[in-house]
Amino acid sequence: MKDKHFIMFMAPSLIAMLLFIALPIVSVFIQSLHIEHEQVIVTSQSCGPFGCTEETSVDAEATAALKEADPLGRFAGFQTYTGRNHLATSEVANIVAESSSVGEFFSDLLNLRFYKALSFTVAYTAVVTPFVVLLGLLIALAVNSVTPVMKGPTIFLTLLPMIITPLIGSLVLFWMIDARGILGASLANLVGDPNLSLKASPVLTWIMLMVYGIWHSAPFAFIIFYAGIQTVPQDTVEAAMVDGATRWERVRYIVIPHLAPLVVFISLIQLMDNFRVFEPIVGFQSGANATSLSYIIYQDLRGNEMQLFGSAAATSMLTIVGIAILVSPVAVKTWRDFTRKVI
Amino acid sequence: MTVRNMTILAAAVALCTAPAAYSQTCPIETDVTGASIRILSNDFPALHAVNERAQACAGSGNEVSINATAEHKNIQVAALTANPAEYSVAVVANGSLVPLLADGLVRPLDDLADKFNVPQRQRITINGKTMAIAFMANSQHLFYRADLLEKAGIEPPETYEQVLAAAKAIEEQGIMEHPLALNTGVGWHLGEEFVNMHLGMGGDFFAPGSAEPAINNETGVKTLEMLKSLTEYSNPDFLTFDGNTTNGLWSAGQLALMVHWGSRADQITGGQTPDDIGQNTVLSGMPTVADGDKAAATLWWDGFSIATNVSDKDAEASFVAMLNAIQPEILDSHTDKAVWIIEGYEPGPAAVGVQETMATGATPYPMTPYMGILHGVLGEELTDYLQGSESAEDALDDIEQSYIAAAREQGFLQ
């Protein structure tokens, strides 16, 4: 395709991406470099139905004047990023200097809000992504060998976990794992510990969230692998059968290499999605045991009466950086393949 | 006078007094017409009643629209910053008024309040200016099952130490496991429990006149220790207990002692609660703690304020509609929905808990501009201590450091 045609073809998408993705990211980045103006506080009497007290309040006119002069706020550079609620550079330096063992280092580090959230987010991504790929592949191979009559209904049922809205799905599972819910009670019976509570223990909560994540995303991998399996060249498979290859050998030497590009594709999508895990944490109300980067952004914006825009903006930028780091190996490989082909 | 003339006179008098029959339910009159009244409020029965009356009493020629949503706190600042404001009336509480004050988004109501004779008790004044008109009060208080306490042979508790003893007795006698619950759900609710207990211990949150935090001291440690002791008698899932969960547990007969909002008392004793539980539920004032003389609770008022960025005509029409809504006439059909701060209100059985809490002189929730930041941080950072992975002093230090970082961002500290 000529370059000019390519540009015209891509132009609408490029313009939309520029307006709705690139510019907002630039705006969020600029906001993350600013903090609010110094608030002008006055002490005065405040009275209500319960009596009068001395109370501090913000001088609205003086603050409004400051905002008119400089709407973005005070420029603070990367202060928000290095502050305690984000990368906490000085606190981490202290911890490195003062901790005597790796265990102590980690427990002090995970005390900091950002690193606590990062630890769960990375663990979730690292566990859910490979399991989703594996489970999707297994389900696709299994469904492929179902009798044609049952294939339609089987595919529909397999897709259901992905169709259910994440928040609703996680709420349903949350109620089922309650100590009085069907899963929670069965598990307590099985283990023989009547006080087993899946919601109270951090380890079990993490496992529950990851199980939910795998359950919810496996259909996505399944449907892509299933489509890929339909394109496996049949003559190669028949030739292998003639040569006496077992079922497992056929899968291992023909089907899986054929699906390799799809594995890369699914891993990429899953890495990006899992790093932004959020709905299960809200649905499971597990903010005490597991927080993620998206969840702490939500807490900054919705947690209380005051919305901390600068802090949320900084965490958003750090999430983008995190995803870029995760995706970089694939991007580098694709670039190398591209430049090699040009030669 | 002939019969015919008398009939005409009687008809004329009847026609003249017909408007007076209308003004029976909407006693305050105004001649403002063609105004637009747009109300933003929270979403619970008492406010539904107020909004309905405001709509009925809006006056002829004025259009009314209502948005009653639990998300009101999150949308109010942006909605009222617009010019003209999206809403002319914001129904607020102690906490949610503060961000509106800071940005100057609500107007002083002194002239309107004087013009329509609003009682002083209902005026919320900041720095001498009336910024909101209050109409109901709320607070958390104690609920207990009289039958279970009797079975265990315990007197109704009046201090938190007695609550602990009661819970212990109920557990030891095998009557109920995990008999106690507070709203300890991580987030705003957990923060609120700390705020209540700390005030009951006589503690302060900030150094006087400044935004520096002052909770990392002996009082703070005692507050945390009391909270931890209380949660030991709660189900281990206590960090997921928001208001709805504790409500559900009570109705399911899984609790003997609970701390919950007075505005929920109606729901808890009626509706979906089985009779044997509902009838044995006793509402009592919030306990005191550590030999304090005031209840370990915060008092909340709900009221309305008028946006700055609306025309004076809209402002006056909105004020009159809302003022009409909260006249004593509302008590005719809605008296049980809240603890009203209205003349002629007689507290019903659902209001006993809040009344007793108010009588013990509990503190109103502080309307300090940076209180919201501390409240949010408390809700997030207390979980480590309550789960036993951190000491009380470390937890308080973490909270203060986290708060200082957030307060610096918001310009309250340098």
Image (tube, helix red, strand yellow):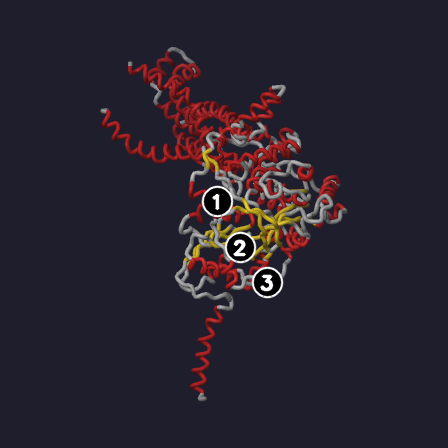
**Considering depth in this image, is A79 or B270 the residue closer to the camera?**
A79
**Of callouts 2 and 3, the N-terminal one:** 2
Q: Chain of mark 1?
A: A
Q: Chain of mark 3?
A: B
Q: Tell me the element at label 3.
A: loop
Residue at the image point whose x is 44% and y is 16% from the top: A248
Q: Position of residue B335 (x, y in %)?
A: 58, 60
Q: Nearer the viewer, mark 3 or mark 1?
A: 1
Q: CA distance from mark 3 to mark 1?
A: 38 Å
Q: Chain of mark 2?
A: B
Which three-letter amino acid code belongs to the residue tagged 1?
Answer: Thr
Crowding at mark 2 (Cα within 10 Å: few <14, some 14-19, many 20+): some
Q: Quadrant of the N terminus of chain A?
A: top left
Q: Do badges 1 and 2 share one subunit?
A: no
Q: Position of residue B189 (x, y in %)?
A: 59, 42
Q: Residue furthest right?
A: B153
Q: Tell me the element at label 1.
A: helix
Judging by the rendered image, the residue that carries numbered circle 1 is: A63
Q: Do badges 3 and 1 share one subunit?
A: no
Q: Please say if the residues under marks 2 and 3 sit with CB atoms less than 8 Å apart.
A: no
Residue at the image point whose x is 43% and y is 14% from the top: A249
Judging by the rendered image, the residue that carries numbered circle 2 is: B129
Which three-letter amino acid code belongs to the residue tagged 3?
Answer: Glu
Q: Tell me if residue B383 can be seen.
A: yes
Q: Position of residue B261 (x, y in %)?
A: 61, 49
Judging by the rendered image, the residue that carries numbered circle 3 is: B343
Image position of B4 with respect to B332: above or below: below
Residue at the image point whose x is 45% and y is 85% from the top: B6
